[in-house]
Image (spheres, rainbow, N blue to C red):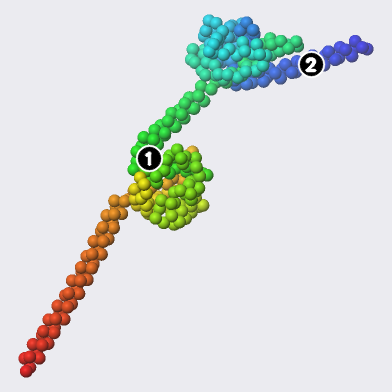
Amino acid sequence: MVMGSLFKKLSDSKRVIEEKGDYTKVIFEGLEDPILLINKRFEIAGANEAAARFAGCPKKELIGKKCYKKIHLQNSPCRFPTVCPVRKVMKKKESVQLSHTHYDGEGNPHLVEVLALPLKDSYGRCTLVVEICRDITEKVKLYENLQASEERFRSIVHDVLDSSEVGVFILDKDFRVVWINTALERYFGLKREDVIGKDKRQLLREKIKKIFEDPDGFEKRVLATYEDNTYIEDFVCHVLPEGNREERWLRHWSRPIKMGLYSGGRIEHYYDITEQYKLMQRLEKRVTDLERLYKAFIGRELQMRQLKEEIRELKKKLGER
């Protein structure tokens, strides 16, 4: 009876182990990432189909091979400055995550993110290291391309926009200053390092509006674009001279940013129209002067007509006598 009960328990335990083993195998083979089991002699003790596909050979040709020869194309285990995940996990008995260069069956290098885990026996000794390898080559290339794109964008910003004579404010969705160019610094008497990251609304109230002939009117029109950031604003403002800041007439033209990194923000352009404004003032003065002369001329002409009429009347009266 006791033997029968013991036999049943052993059978049940065997069945659970077998079921668990089948389940583990399904997971092991079902993962798309290559998985390697490596022992302390750096020999590949197990691999899934994904690892075999990466290596370009059947699984049986991987088993027993040195990982550093088959995966890294080296004659010895990885050494400083390259960190060997197998050696580190065996020593620390804990998981590590790092990046490695693995070579596929055709000798092509791949940048791989490795998660290495210890597989321990019942005594807590690390007998195998499980390496789960994810190819991040394309991800890194995408990141590098993105960085290159950002570098080109920075080049456009700094080399092109920064040399522009149009003053530029770029604001994020919270209306904090992302960037200003050199022209804007000159027009407003600001320093880029003092305003980057600052709330434009606060800067406007505390500093910027004070440089204009109509500070309250300027503040009201600009703040309105932040409260309703859906429309294009266009108006002329007068900067007063002070210290190194020159007198200027600027055309403010701004619009919401609808796409990209600063979507929801706003871009403000300030065009220096001082020369055009002064020319317009001169033209308006000339027109006024001409109108005055014309009126004076017309007035004299009327006077002459009246004088001639009076002379005719006098002659007529004299002739009658």
Horizontal arrangement in the rendering, residue 115 relative to residue 164 (left or right): right
Residue 204 x/y as whole percent: 47, 49
Residue 250 x/y as whole percent: 36, 51
Relative depth, front residue between 2 and 151: 151
Q: Is residue 117 above or below residue 202?
A: above
Three-letter amino acid code at the position of disc 2: Arg
Residue at mark 1: 182
- First in residue order: circle 1 vs circle 2: 2
Quadrant where the N terminus is found in the figure: top right
Three-letter amino acid code at the position of disc 1: Thr
Query: Quadrant of the rendered structure where residue 130 is?
Result: top right
Residue 220 x/y as whole percent: 47, 55
Mark 1 secondary-structure assignment: helix
Relative depth, front residue between 123 and 281: 281
- Check the image and name the residue furthest to the bottom: 321
Asked whether residue 49 is in view, the answer is: no
- Check the image and name the residue furthest to the right: 1
At 58% from the left and 6% from the top, the residue drawn is 66
Relative depth, front residue between 63 and 275: 275
Horizontal arrangement in the rendering, residue 148 relative to residue 310 (left or right): right
Residue at mark 2: 15
Mark 2 secondary-structure assignment: helix
Do the residues bearing badges 1 and 2 touch, measured as CB atoms within 8 Å?
Answer: no
